[in-house]
Image: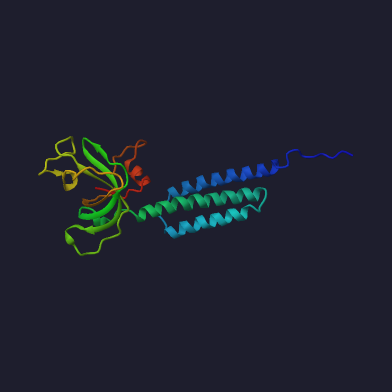
Amino acid sequence: MVIRVDSRPGDSLGARGGGAGFALLAGSVAGTAAQLRQTVLWEETLYALLVAFAFVGWLMSTRAAGRSRWLAALLVGAMAGFGATGWRAAAYAADALDPAFEGRDVQVVGVVAQMPQVGEAGLRFVLEVESVAWAGGTASPVPRQPSRLALGWYASGTGLWARGATESAPGGNSAVAAPGPLHAGERWRLTVRLKAPHGNLNPHGFDQELRMWEQGIAASG
């Protein structure tokens, strides 16, 4: 009597696992693409629930077999991709600059998050915001504060953005010399005038607004 022994018993299991993994990846790509086409964001809670359901669905799908497991993995991936992408977008939108801040002087306290960049046009740096208050002692309540700001001083007498001490920089900001060298990790109290992120239109090229979004920067000033 001859008995055939499979020398690689894990092959079929590995193939099923690989197929489910591919379906999971394809579903996540489809879910991400679908969320990017949303014209209006949902509440953060809804996206978080989708991610939670996707996790539970993945645990349950491991008990399925064959085509059912592939379809379950595809659905779970779509839910996870849609939910995670939307969750991040909603979180950033919640941190966007409140329109009440634009065009007004505010006093911020924060920590220099990165090494400042010094150039001919002046000094630029990123500030992690700890607190915000209206400049001039205004007692009215402050709207939701942004968490990260891209700030800078315009250099005097250098280049397109430079202005003399009595001239006004673009947006009505006066050119003010930096009070001294800045270093990463230092805490500063500054009076700033903020604006929402804006960038030049450059189709299929560098996107300044997208770059600021990726860095979590809600405003510049």
On-image quarter of the N terminus: top right
Q: Is residue 39 visible?
A: no
Q: Quadrant of residue 145?
A: bottom left
Residue shown at the point (36%, 45%) measured from the top left: 215
Residue shown at the point (39%, 54%) measured from the top left: 91
In the image, residue 4 sits, relative to residue 147, either above or below, namely above
Q: Is residue 62 left or right of residue 209?
A: right
Q: Is residue 219 left or right of residue 173?
A: right
In the image, residue 133 sits, relative to residue 117, either above or below, namely below
Indicate the position of residue 111 as horizontal and vertical percent values: 29, 50
Q: Quadrant of residue 10?
A: top right
Indicate the position of residue 90 as horizontal and vertical percent values: 40, 54
Residue shown at the point (22%, 64%) measured from the top left: 140
In this view of the protein, which residue sits in the foreground, 31 or 118?
A: 118
Type of colouring: rainbow
Q: Is residue 68 visible?
A: yes
Image label count: 0
* Residue sitting at the far right: 1
Indicate the position of residue 35 as horizontal and vertical percent values: 45, 50
Residue shown at the point (54%, 54%) measured from the top left: 54
Indicate the position of residue 172 as horizontal and vertical percent values: 16, 47
